[in-house]
Amino acid sequence: MAAPGTTGDEGGRQPGPTENIDSILTEERRFEPPASFSAGAHVKSLAEYQALRDAAERDPVAFWAGLARDELHWHRPFTSAFDDSRAPYYAWFGDGLLNVSFNCLDRHLAKNADKTAILFEGEPGDTRRISYAELHRRVCRFANALKMRGIGLGDRVIIYMPMVPEAVVAMLACARIGAIHSVVFGGFSSGSLRNRIEDASARTVITADGGHRGGKVIELKAACDTALSEGCKSVETVFVLRRAGNHVRMQHGRDLWWDEAESNLADECEPVWVDGEHPLFLLYTSGSTGKPKGIQHASAGYLVVVAATMKWVFDIRDSDIFWCTADIGWVTGHSYVAYGPLACGATVLMYEGAPTVPDAGRFWSICARHHVTIFYTAPTAIRALMKLGESFPARYDLSSLRLLGTVGEPINPEAWMWFHRVIGHERCPIVDTWWQTETGAIMIAPLPGAITTKPGSCTRPLPGIDADIVDANGHSIADFAQGGELVIRKPWPSMLRAVWGDDRRYRDTYWGKFDGRCYIAGDTAHRDHDGYFWILGRSDDVLKVSGHRLGTMEIESALVAHPRVAEAAVVGKPDETKGESIFAFVVPRGARPTGDAAGTLSAELRAWVAQQIGPIAKPDHIRYADSLPKTRSGKIMRRLLRDIARGEAITQDTSTLENEEIVRQLQGEP
Ligand code: PRX
């Protein structure tokens, strides 16, 4: 029988929703919220959580509307909270007027002007504290610089920056004038940058000379120059922040140094009041095709849910030092480095560099020196640091920590327990948070003062989030031992609004399957007897490599663009540290290389993919064959390739293959 959530077709991706269930079902450890934590928490008990859920279930629109009124400053209150007349293009708070940067800055100034908004540490060790008053000034000044270059309402602005406070300044400056930003992760190459600039028809790029990462300078401006030399005709201005001091080329008339551009400009900039549905940002993410999609988020609905989840899930308090290690180029950085913490008037820590510079104690040293109270990171980082031993965290005083969190991929119970014991000293609750670029904010996670946790489970949906697990017909799965497709049954305010420039892709990908009745997340999951959710992995051709989301098709397209490659298929292979590694099967043009020639070509292809997409997409393993195994209808037999990549016995029928010898080649036999 085909596993739920799949087509049963050999060609479809199928991570095997049932295969992990046995191990999950045997996980019996439970961790109650510590009484001392619950006592001071925003949501103090299971009963309080349940009451919130019940209220949301009784009247979802009234529930979210109440939050929108409580959490945000409205220049003009909304009268219509929700509009489903154009489903699945849902609208929230559409006739209200607000400004997101006003909500993140101005409204805090009366009480918290001197409070630290951003606490920054660069990889070389430089530190800065930026108060809310200063952040406000800097955002206004830079917003004025954008305006001087003709940027205004609805214009797209690409941000390609290192993890420095100015990245947040740039985002908020766009929000201040109603421009739509699209942050591109600094680890992406010039090719990825160019694609995103062109898809968004951006008028401006904001970048830096370089950033510090892993002991090296990442040459962002140079990558930007390459992207712009290959197209990107819409770009009129490039702002360049001085960060790493590396030499860059400035093109007269187009390129401006950030400091010079804003030097004589005012510290005040009237916010542009936009309607609740005005697009706040685009963020490109990988899907099942070769082309990343621009996920479009709206202003008000997004901000309401990120602010609410800061309270529900992170239990944010005025005195917290909140550190989310995600890069600003991913949605986690948008929601829990920039918008969520600042909407709540919190102090957020930003770190520029790698976790292992100068050694594997860097994260713990930062926690100790800056008295971090809430620490939110990716399982892949935990696993990598766990491997390097307990002696690193043991050197630092981690007693300021009170809450830990994970995001981006399933966390294996062993890593969860290490995080709990070695970092949290068995004192800090752990929130395993499930969500996506598309959901805008956390959807399924424990409320740390209210919900008992189990290592490896993201536990229960948040209030107002109607998550479910369904079979191939869209029916809720009652059988606890069966996995299925993760869906969300009701619209929620922070959901994506569109795929930029591609309405059809929005409808087909997210609402296409069950007559548009629910949002399809693209994950498989399973629920236990307590109603806890356990995420099993993606149900589409998306990989999670070190928590980074990559499409197999994207990597395949990059490979086949190389002159030596005729055909390529990419699959994920489970990896102890990275979660998944990238395994590429390649049909070369000309003779199949073996021995040293194979090694040389593989090195060339890895470098090629790094140049086309970015170093994060480099295949970890490459195998060569004279052809790829296909079904009769011509689809690549991905399940077979996955089994081969894992080194598992082949259970599928390969008799239809024209040349069974191919399987032996794919298995790496000489
Ligand atoms: O597969 C799920 C996984 O990450 C995907 C979303 O990736 P992205 O849009 O890059 O956003 C990541 C940060 C929010 C999901 O479809 N994922 C995310 N969080 C978890 C997770 N898988 C298991 N457990 C999680 N807590």
Image: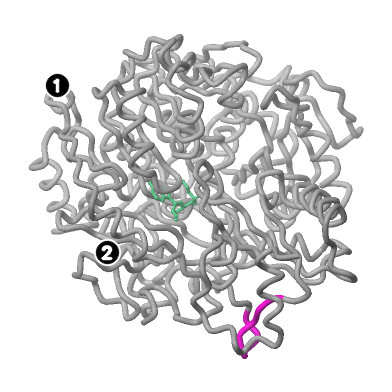
Label 2 sits on a secondary structure element that is strand
Q: Which residue is mark 2?
A: 468
Rendered-image quadrant of the N terminus: bottom left
Asked if 61 appears above or below 350 in the picture, the reply is below
**Image quarter of residue 242:** top right
Which residues are the magenta region? 628-635
Residue 610 visible in rendering = yes
Q: Is mark 2 within 8 Å of ligand 1?
A: no
Residue nearest the observer in this picture, 51 or 376 = 376
Q: Nearer the viewer, residue 560 or 248?
A: 560
The image shows residue 434 at horizontal and vertical percentages of 37, 48
Which residue is painted at 48% across and 13% down in the image? 365
Locate residue 568: give its quadrant. Answer: bottom right
The image position of residue 400, as x and y in percent, is: 33, 14
Quarter of the image where the C terminus is located: bottom right
Q: Is residue 5 above or below residue 362?
A: below
Q: Which secondary structure is most common in the magenta stretch?
A: loop
Residue type, label 2: Asp
Q: Residue at x 29, y 66 (%)?
A: 469
Q: Counting residues from the N terminus, which is met first, the one under dot 1 or under dot 2? A: 1
